[in-house]
Image: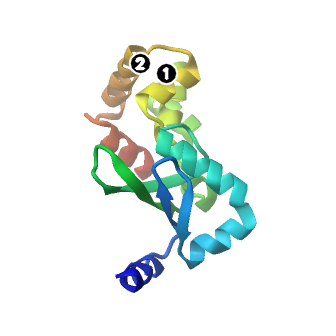
Amino acid sequence: MIDAFETALSMIPHPTFVIGRGGELLHANAQGEQLLVRERVDIQRSLVQAVRGELHDHVWRLTSLGDALRPVGFIAVLEPNPARSGAAPDLQSVSGRWKLTARQAEVLELVARGATNATIADALGIKKRTVEFHLSALFDKAGVDNRATLIARLLAL
């Protein structure tokens, strides 16, 4: 069973980690090990922040291990960062195209980075309901009706 798990992790082309529910590193595939040699502290901090739902500099795809309501840990796959790959949307251009207010642009930037409404509210010093108001305006201006479609629309520009 362990060999099958190791083989499955090795097939993932991106740095992949098995982490505890607090974000602590338990295992890494070969790409993950290489990344840890270069950026251990940054990666460990980012994983903890991802598990907590906080803002961080990496794009993690987290998959719960065990019970979805109370996971024992996660498989964390580091997705290619659009900003590093050159595929990041030009938020200033989007702001002009969609005629966003300064605050809407700030909310959009945080949404694009994967922040939750609560994290956006904390980061901007506003209430969660205010974030929802700005998201609703963003949905209208982008011609979408949900967060996932907003991000897809943003990346398509």
Pinpoint residue 64: horizontal percent, then vertical percent.
35, 55
Specify the quadrant that holds the N terminus.
bottom left
User: What's the residue type where badge 1 is placed?
Assistant: Ala
Pinpoint residue 106: horizontal percent, then vertical percent.
55, 27
Question: In the image shown, does 62 or 83 lie closer to the viewer?
Answer: 62
Residue at the spot 28% in from the left edge and 43% down from the top edge:
69
Question: In the image shown, does 82 or 15 lie closer to the viewer?
Answer: 15
Q: Tell me which numbered mark, 2 or 1, is placed earlier along the sequence.
A: 1
Mark 1 element type: helix
Estimate the spatial distance between the alpha carbons at disc 2 and disc 1, rounded to whole Å. 5 Å
The image's mark for residue 140 is none
Left-right relation of 88 to 148:
right
Q: In the rendered image of this protein, does residue 97 appear above or below residue 48?
A: above
Q: In the rendered image of this protein, does residue 115 appear above or below residue 135?
A: below
Pinpoint residue 89: horizontal percent, then vertical percent.
52, 47
User: What's the residue type where badge 2 is placed?
Assistant: Lys
* Residues under numbered marks 2 and 1 in contact, where contact means CB atoms less than 8 Å apart: yes
Q: In the rendered image of this protein, does residue 66 appear above or below residue 125?
A: below
Left-right relation of 137 to 50:
left
Residue under numbered circle 1: 121
Residue under numbered circle 2: 128
Question: In the image shown, does 141 or 61 lie closer to the viewer?
Answer: 61
Mark 2 element type: helix
Tell me, what colour scheme is on the image? rainbow
Residue at the spot 60% in from the left edge and 58% down from the top edge:
86
The picture quadrant where one finds residue 142 is: top left
Pinpoint residue 15: horizontal percent, then vertical percent.
55, 69
| Residue lying furthest right | 38
Residue 94 visible: yes
The picture quadrant where one finds residue 3 is: bottom left
